[in-house]
Image (cartoon, helix red, strand yellow):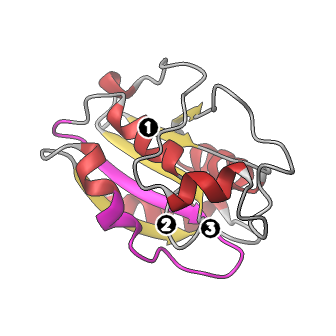
Amino acid sequence: MKKILVAYFSASGTTARAAKALAGAIGAQIYEIKPEKPYTRADLDWTDKRSRSSVEMSDKSSRPALADKNAPVSECDVIFLGFPVWWYTAPTIINTFLESYDFSGKKIILFATSGGSGFGKTKDDLLNSAGKTAEICEGKILNGPLNAAELKTWSESLI
């Protein structure tokens, strides 16, 4: 039986709700990816080109520091990786997370929350950070009410 981890980054709580619903539906461990310096409301103001999130997202080499590196990645075969979509891709802290662990031979299934866009080029943007022997699958945007049975069926179809 494959060991599954749901790892997620959530700036406002929306992705956290989706991650907790997914982990509960599939009986997986859950891990929150936290930035060393938490984001403030002003940091997340995408209309301000000088806000922290805008600056990070306009610099593809940006790698915000993690609060810890305690994710149980080595113990798991499949990692569901969740995040809010920022500027049609994953926040750069997701690159930091992927570059902080060895994902060799692991399957990474992306899920996200979004205010209106899809995954865009997220999968392509994360391939180098995950390493050459990791498999990344574009999963699903998990917005709105989340049905446990549907989450279980969807996740099992990808594992």
Asked if 88 appears above or below 32 in the picture, the reply is: below
Residue located at (34% from left, 55% from top): 126
Q: Quadrant of residue 30?
A: top right
Q: x, y percentage for residue 95?
A: 41, 45
Magenta-colored span:
104-125
For mark 3, give the secondary structure: loop
N-terminal label among 2 and 1: 2
Q: Is residue 157 visible?
A: no
Say whether marks 3 and 2 touch (CB < 8 Å): no
N-terminal label among 3 and 1: 1
Asked if 159 appears above or below 8 in the picture, the reply is: below
Residue 96 marker: 1
Quadrant assignment for the N terminus: top left
How packed is label 2: few (under 14 Cα within 10 Å), some, or many (20 or more)?
many
Residue 142 marker: 3
Residue kind at label 2, given as amino acid type:
Thr
Q: x, y percentage for residue 121?
A: 38, 73
Q: Nearer the viewer, residue 50 or 149?
A: 50
